[in-house]
Image: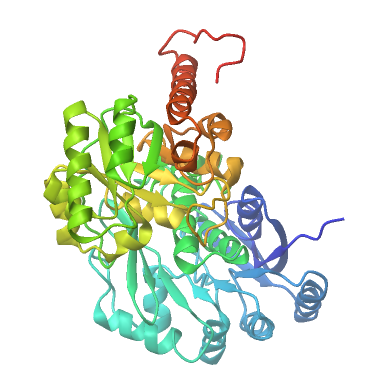
Amino acid sequence: MSVHATLLSIAGHDPSGGAGIGTDLAVWQSMGLHASSVCTALTVQDAQGVRDVQPTPLPVLRGALAAARRELRPAAVKLGMLGGAQVAAEVAAFCEALDSPVVWDPVLGASAGGVSLLQAEPETLRRLARASTVITPNRVEAAQLLGLPAWEDEGEPPRTWVSALREQWLQGGRTRAVLLKGGHARGSSSVDWLCTQQAVHALSVPRVPDGPGGRVHGTGCVYASALAGMLAQGADLEQAAVEAQWRTHAAIAQAWMSPGGRAMVHAAALPDSGDFPSLHSGAPTEARAFAPLLRPPGLYPVVPDSDWVLRLLELGVDTVQLRAKALAGAELRAQVRAAADAARARGAQLFINDHWREALDAGAWGVHLGQEDLMELRAPQIESIRQAGLRLGVSTHHPAELARAHALRPSYLALGPVWPTTVKETPHAPLGLARLRALAARCKPLYPLVGIGGISLERAASALDCGLDGFAVVSAIVSAADPAAAVRSGQAIARAALQWREHLAGKAPALQTSGTGHV
């Protein structure tokens, strides 16, 4: 019998079903995680606000928390509405004894108004902050708890805010980050700010306008519980923050209307491309899209030198990447130029891996960057690549890297590693087909997608079936006994898969096969 890692929600009960414990558990269930809860208070609330709060009796609360720690040993804890001062102090003591991540959503009141949902002494609030891994206030809550002036514009957090966050919440405890949620600000985008002692990053997503039911109820619960769910699985802060924003935006976009007339989050909503967030280092900037691809990549060989590029062009390959890691200086420039000239003459989509300066000088068709190379570039360098008309492909491994790439609006995204690979070392675990399919669904139809990592010709069809537009191969071509035969086989696999997809979408006739299936 398997043992499941369990998350623990310590929050209040909302009889409307739009927030509190019920929402936390629904989010975790949608993430495939096991969930448990300890109720801090019963509330009487509806669309007109919170009418009454009855904290859980201390002996019951204390016993429930002890049982949760003894039986479940929670992998992460999410704190929501705490209610009374004694309850808050008891929860603070419980969290201080934990060694697992704690996400504190400092709920001060319901969006519809009514009685206060957090009564606590200043020292108890300090204890809660010091015992939390991440704190997720909206701007109103942060201003009230930290004694800050109102901040409503779309720009970066004022220096007074950043200083207060670092001095009061990010110093002297276990708190690693504060995520300032942007739902209460103005502007066409909702911007959350990930603040640490070292840096401030912006996560932006298009704002969903308020509907007839007003501000959606339960968004803070979705956000904090998704964040806790990611931390429980070992995600870093950026990954967890992007996933939290992505899921919250989807929950708002797919909100439902209660019979009483209030808009409620769809806690189990799955993100898609309509909710795509952008991750910025510093303030968000609007980016023009890079030039698009001419055609789906299909078979996408990655080769070590220009001789291989020329050979593949002769074999009819029309999308290829030059990954010349062993070359430098004049030899590198010569090979990039030779490959670029040959590809240009044949109308092929040639991407130069990493060496963007050489690609610019040679007038190459495009450049492909990994995440480390991408983060080394500054805005003027990225703009010079865009203005030169080069296409941009970006390697990604998880939602945070997708969000960082989306901030630049590249020509295509590469997802991987799909399977284990011996071609290059990577700190990222293989996605597998289920995870690949889920990430691909989030990116379509905004971006063409290429699978990378561990893809052989035998595996290519199953990878393409996850929604990819192409698959990158290295050894399947350069180590093949008959590269020409390998190219023909790879092209046939890609052509069959893409034609079958068009047929399913009603855009093409069914593919005729020789009895071996559609791919």
Q: Please give left or right for residue 209 compared with residue 118 in the image.
A: left
Question: Residue at position x 38%, y 53% from top?
Answer: 403
Q: Relative to 499, say whether 340 is above or below.
A: below
- Specify the farthest residue to the right: 1
* Percent x, y of residue 516: 61, 15
Question: Residue at position x 25%, y 65% from top?
Answer: 283
Picture quarter with the C terminus = top right
Picture quarter with the N terminus = bottom right
Q: Out of 437 and 128, give the one closest to the viewer.
A: 437
Question: Residue at position x 29%, y 40% from top?
Answer: 307
In the rendered image, is residue 116 in sight? yes
* Residue 91 in which image quadrant: bottom right
Q: Out of 467 and 326, give the one closest to the viewer.
A: 326
Q: Out of 74 and 308, give the one closest to the viewer.
A: 308
Q: Please give left or right for residue 308 compared with residue 107 in the image.
A: left
* Percent x, y of residue 388: 12, 46
* Percent x, y of residue 366: 23, 43
Question: Residue at position x 20%, y 34% from top?
Answer: 342
